[in-house]
């Protein structure tokens, strides 16, 4: 019997992990994002929470829509990050709570957590302990610095992990402080790796019958993403602090020595250009253009109407375009400023010139014809947020769109179902647990749905 | 070659045919480092990604691209011209031995050659094919030409990355470097493939996976989408920190040795108790200013003093070397990060403890180079680099001859006719 009420595990191509049960101890972003993808692929993901130490995203006041009563079940950012999971509220530091969690693990395939290093072990929920209950458990830990190594106890959040990994230094204008990444890229990416490690270890278990502990470091995932820069240093001894690096949006900064700056092939033009202003002072009215060959440049010149400046021989070769980038980019911008960014990209693409609009979040949701065509966002009803748009998967499995499995859990929403239906805890014991502060803190007011679940148990 | 591990990687037994350029070669590398038998199928003469720098000692040559080296570790390599009937024939034979074909040709290209999923799966029903294209297999932008920069524009990375207007008034949106559009899509491709493998483990059925770089990038801007959906507001770009609809104190500060430190969010964890910890530490340097004042023991005062704390921190860091500031903060449980360059990352003792710096042998050069190793330690089936990237056609004999059993005479003929 599954906690969601279905009888037997079944595997469909678009939800291949149906039948896999995940005990999800993660919080904030990277860990929950990992488990979100396991849920989207069909796993039964049980999010373990405790209202006195709430997931930070449940407290994110920036994403509570106007008119919605603020609270832990009302934030848009938590909703998308935890879509399709079940919610269990339980105090693992209460002996009865610990016992219940252990019995849950004994019927689960995966344990995933992103606490600071070694916290789970301190709670009696470390890998060695849990293998006694479930010898083939796949146990994925996602600490910032990992579980081993002399600085394992160092804490990170996305921006710090990005800084330490070398990713931040790769982003910005030369001679300025780094611009870095305008969000926790390594929380998104750390989440990807959490999911990847889990799936990889499940594959190994399917092949060998053997579970394992995967000790992932969020910060180190970022270093692997700087591979070309890493080898340029370890092999060529290239200085990272050098003239013209990082080269903004270009491949080579004007006037700086022509070296490879980890932007793919050296090319010019290769930049962002202002386009016709629409609204908001033109804040996101930008388009990028990259000419990866002389032919593409020739096509761009034609598209611009063949102005005299652009036909000058100094721009015919890549070397010439690199040398005269500033002038060239100014000339191009005189033209792009007269055209809307979508029109401009369409015109360029029709002429074989690589161009795309810089898209804001609003653009991607409201204006992007491709994402609309592919059905990137799916409305799912959420008890607090109403019909809410959730981000789907960037892949189709055998032609099928893969949308989220359902809304996120309200805190503790499925506690009685999981404890009762799945683990066979009696109504009497459940009620006792609520009274003892095992399933809900004694001093925290109960949400109506929590009280309702308790009342239903009392009637049994 | 380089691994002292006796255990096999978790993907051992999976054969992958990789026909990808920059789009998804990183996905192939991850699978190869995790034990899959990844065979990179390149056109005769080698793939275009071999022409991307940096190059060994700055000498441009298809066998000296460090970019290619990084993204193709642990793979074997063959050359094959898929436009020729003999090449297609060999590819069909090879795909009958594979569990996965990973490809990034333009939508429809392989089908037009008669090598689409339907055709290849006829002889191999368990086959999984994963196609990675800029926009997926359909839609109005399907045939648009792109690059890493273009994806970071359309995907929303640039709209979130850049500088505060106060720092640089005319700064453009910034596309972070390093080829991350390809990383992002490689991660999602990997996840989709593992899901398909799980399905196959229980049913024996393969399937076709259609991955879009654009959708993968569009999914990777954390809160920007949720903020718009919740409030209708579009985020502003801020130097070194989260793009947000509101203003917030700066968190990136210069140190006295030319470095920068990132404090994640200046208000983060700053309760009265934490202010006291911070103040006492800074007082040791005579730089606490008023942080030890009693008024900061009132949470309401702390709540509205974010800009002041940022100013005090800025002054403190301006008098400290980078590593001392960052490690000192971490020892007191402040989750700060030094903005490191490769100079600081190379030889980092913590990374050494985790065997992150992996020597990889290049026998043809008689040299050994240090590569970035695993981000995760698997205790039963290691993630490890097993060999350097393949030379052009390095395993033609081994794979076409020894494993597929093509007669030697045929191989010679295929070579002279330019098929391999």
Image (cartoon, coloured by chain):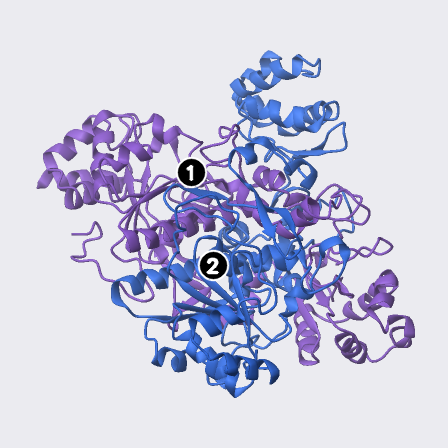
Chain colours: A purple, B blue
Horizontal placement of B380 versus B239: left or right? left
Mark 1 = which residue?
A114
At which x and y percent is residue A135?
24, 41
At which x and y percent is residue B33?
48, 53
How many marks can you see? Answer: 2
The image quadrant of residue A457 is top left
Along the viewing direction, whichever of A148 and A186 lies nearer the viewer = A148
Q: Under tag 2, what secondary structure?
A: helix
The image quadrant of residue B198 is bottom left
> Mark 2 vs mark 1: same chain?
no
Horizontal placement of B354 versus B255: left or right? left
Horizontal placement of A299 versus A450: left or right? right
Q: Residue at x 59, y 40 (%)?
A: A159
Among all residues in the image, which is located at the extreme bottom?
B85
- Protein chain holding label 1: A
Along the viewing direction, whichever of B321 and A448 lies nearer the viewer = B321
Q: Under tag 1, what secondary structure?
A: loop
Q: Confirm whether residue B244 shows in the render.
A: no
Along the viewing direction, whichever of B217 and B343 lies nearer the viewer = B343
- Graded by Cα atoms within 10 Å as few (under 14), some (14 to 19) or many (20 or more), the crowding at tag 1 reads many
Q: Residue at x 32, y 75 (%)?
A: B125
Residue B188's disc is 2
Q: Is residue B236 above or below residue A274?
A: above
Q: Residue at x 63, y 35 (%)?
A: B347
């Amino acid at each position: 019997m599954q906690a969601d009420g279905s009888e037997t595990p079944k595997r469909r191509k678009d939800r291949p992990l149906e039948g896999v049960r995940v005990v999800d101890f993660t919080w904030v972003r990277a860990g929950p994002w990992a488990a979100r993808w396991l849920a989207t692929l069909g796993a039964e993901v049980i999010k373990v929470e405790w209202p006195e130490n709430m997931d930070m995203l449940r407290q994110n006041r920036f994403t509570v829509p106007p008119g919605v009563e603020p609270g832990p079940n009302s934030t848009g950012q938590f909703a998308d990050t935890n879509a399709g999971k079940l919610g269990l509220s339980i105090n693992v530091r209460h002996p009865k709570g610990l016992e219940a969690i252990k019995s849950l693990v004994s019927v689960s395939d995966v344990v995933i957590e992103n606490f600071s290093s070694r916290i789970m072990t301190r709670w009696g929920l470390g890998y060695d302990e849990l293998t006694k209950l479930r010898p083939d458990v796949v146990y994925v830990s996602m600490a910032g610095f990992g579980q081993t190594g002399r600085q394992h106890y160092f804490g990170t959040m996305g921006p710090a992990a990005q800084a330490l990994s070398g990713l931040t230094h790769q982003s910005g204008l030369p001679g300025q402080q780094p611009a870095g990444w305008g969000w926790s890229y390594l929380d998104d990416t750390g989440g990807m790796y959490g999911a990847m490690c889990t799936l990889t270890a499940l594959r190994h278990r399917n092949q060998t019958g053997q579970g394992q502990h995967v000790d992932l470091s969020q910060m180190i995932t970022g270093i692997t993403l700087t591979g070309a820069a890493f080898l340029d240093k370890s092999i060529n001894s290239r200085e990272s602090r050098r003239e013209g690096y990082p080269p903004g949006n270009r491949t080579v900064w004007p006037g700086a020595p022509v070296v490879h700056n980890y932007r793919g092939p050296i090319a010019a033009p290769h930049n962002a250009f202002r386009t016709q202003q629409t609204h908001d002072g033109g804040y996101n009215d930008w388009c990028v253009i990259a000419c990866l060959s002389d032919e593409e440049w020739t096509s761009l010149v034609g598209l611009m109407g063949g102005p005299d400046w652009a036909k000058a021989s100094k721009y015919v070769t890549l070397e010439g375009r690199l040398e005269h980038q500033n002038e060239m980019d100014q000339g191009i911008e005189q033209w792009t400023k007269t055209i809307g960014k979508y029109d401009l990209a369409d015109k360029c693409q029709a002429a074989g010139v690589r161009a795309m609009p810089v898209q804001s979040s609003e653009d991607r949701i409201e204006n992007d014809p491709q994402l609309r065509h592919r059905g990137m966002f799916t409305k799912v009803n959420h008890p607090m947020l109403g019909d809410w748009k959730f981000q789907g998967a960037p892949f189709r499995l055998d032609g099928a769109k893969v949308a989220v499995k359902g809304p996120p859990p309200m805190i503790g929403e499925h506690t009685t179902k999981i404890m009762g239906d799945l683990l066979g805890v009696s109504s009497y014991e459940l009620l006792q647990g609520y009274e003892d502060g095992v399933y809900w803190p004694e001093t925290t007011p109960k949400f109506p749905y929590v009280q309702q679940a308790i009342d239903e148990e009392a009637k049994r | 070659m380089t691994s002292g591990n006796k255990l096999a990687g978790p993907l051992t037994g999976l054969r992958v045919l990789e026909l990808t350029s920059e789009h998804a070669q990183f996905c192939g590398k991850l699978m190869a480092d995790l034990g899959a038998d990844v065979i990179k199928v390149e056109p005769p003469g080698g793939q275009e990604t071999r022409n991307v720098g940096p190059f060994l000692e700055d000498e441009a040559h298809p066998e000296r691209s460090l970019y290619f080296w990084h993204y193709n570790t642990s793979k074997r390599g063959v050359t094959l011209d898929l436009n020729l009937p003999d090449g297609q024939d060999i590819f069909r034979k090879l795909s009958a031995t594979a569990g996965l074909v990973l490809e990034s040709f333009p939508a429809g290209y392989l089908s037009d050659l008669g090598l689409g999923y339907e055709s290849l799966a006829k002889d191999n029903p368990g086959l999984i094919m994963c196609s990675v294209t800029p926009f997926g297999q359909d839609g109005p932008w399907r045939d648009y030409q792109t690059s890493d920069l273009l994806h970071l524009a359309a995907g929303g990375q640039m709209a979130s990355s850049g500088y505060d207007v106060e720092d640089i008034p005319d700064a453009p949106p910034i596309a972070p470097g390093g080829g991350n559009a390809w990383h992002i899509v490689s991660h999602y491709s990997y996840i989709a493939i593992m899901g398909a493998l799980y399905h196959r483990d229980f049913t024996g059925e393969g399937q076709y996976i259609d991955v879009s770089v654009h959708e993968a990038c569009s999914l990777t801007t954390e809160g920007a989408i949720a903020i718009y959906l919740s409030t209708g507001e579009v985020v502003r770009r801020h130097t070194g920190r989260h793009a947000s609809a509101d203003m917030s104190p700066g968190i990136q500060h210069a140190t006295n040795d030319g470095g920068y430190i990132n404090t994640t969010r200046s208000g983060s964890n700053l309760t009265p108790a934490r202010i006291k910890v911070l103040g006492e530490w800074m007082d040791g340097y005579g730089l606490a200013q008023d942080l030890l004042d009693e008024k900061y023991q009132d949470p309401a005062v702390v709540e509205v003093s974010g800009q002041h704390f940022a100013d005090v921190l800025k002054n403190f860091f301006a008098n400290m070397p980078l590593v001392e500031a960052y490690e000192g903060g971490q020892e007191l449980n402040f989750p700060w990060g030094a903005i490191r360059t490769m100079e600081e990352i190379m030889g980092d003792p913590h990374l050494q403890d985790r065997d992150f710096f992996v020597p990889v042998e290049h026998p043809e050069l008689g040299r050994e180079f240090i590569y970035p190793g695993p981000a995760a330690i698997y205790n039963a089936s290691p993630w490890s680099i097993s060999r350097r990237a393949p030379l052009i056609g390095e395993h033609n004999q081994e794979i076409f001859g020894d494993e597929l059993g093509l007669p030697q005479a045929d191989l010679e003929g295929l070579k002279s006719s330019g098929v391999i």
